[in-house]
Image (tube, helix red, strand yellow):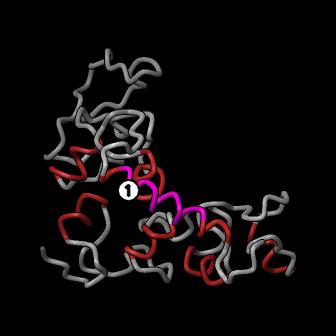
Amino acid sequence: MTDTDRDHLPDEFEDGLGTDPQHRDTDGDGLSDSRELRFGSDPRDADSDGDGLRDGREVFLGTDPMDADTDDDGADDRVETRAGTLSNLDQDHDGQADWLEERDRGRAADDMAQIDGTAVDSDGDGLSDVVETFFTHTDPNNPDTDLDGTQDGTEVWQDHTDPRMVNEGTDHAWRAGHDDYVDGVGEDPGVYIED
């Protein structure tokens, strides 16, 4: 498989995620696309949790790029890094932030569960809940996050399209006037695709 930008993600896979296969760091936040996937941050958003700190800076500081308040004390990470009041990031004092240890353990368990066929896939779309939460950033309770008529797993593994947005010319998009799509939480909220 081709990996043009040498970020350890094949170009086809990057096409499916919506990242740029020509650039190691699609969003320019200081983390390569593959490292963002390890940390659970969005490789297309420089500030995944919206706390005012770029994802690369958060990882450097030990804060979670997917949690605006890593230590859960009511103050966001940016305010606390400026004030020097961040606490409880490494309670076992092993040199690795607790949030990252937890995420790595969850992924390792999910990898094993996928191998033996017991991975939790709440919406049955072919992507485990862990993969959807921390890797593709799709809805683990909706098999078709972008409501385009193609399941998320099919988009990632077969079509190599982004399951978070309708991909013109490649998805089986719902047409204007189609209002009977039911995803388990109610009728189609009105996503219309023009020809």
Q: In which quarter of the image is the N terminus?
A: bottom left
As drawn, is 15 to the left or to the right of 88? left
User: Residue 132 versus residue 48: which sits nearer the camera?
Assistant: 132
Q: Which residue is drawn at 29% across and 72% down?
A: 20
Q: How crowded is mark 1: few (under 14 residues within 10 Å), some or many (20 or more)?
A: few
Identify the element where label 1 is drawn.
helix
Q: Main SS of the magenta segment?
A: helix
What range of the chain is rendered magenta? 102-113
Q: Residue at x 35, y 31 (%)?
A: 191
The stretch drawn in magenta includes residue 178: no
Query: Which residue extends farthest top?
Result: 180
User: Residue 36 versus residue 193: which sits nearer the camera?
Assistant: 36
As drawn, is 159 to the left or to the right of 74? left
The correct choice, above or below, for 15 with respect to 53 in the image is above
Residue 121: x and y in percent read 38, 39
Mark 1 belongs to which amino acid?
A: Met
Residue 123: x and y in percent read 38, 33
Q: Mark 1 points at which residue?
A: 112
**Quadrant of the rendered image containing residue 69:** bottom right
As drawn, is 74 to the left or to the right of 44? right
Q: In which quarter of the image is the C terminus?
A: top left
User: Residue 125 versus residue 118: which sits nearer the camera?
Assistant: 118
Residue 194: x and y in percent read 23, 35
Residue 122: x and y in percent read 42, 34
The stretch drawn in magenta includes residue 107: yes
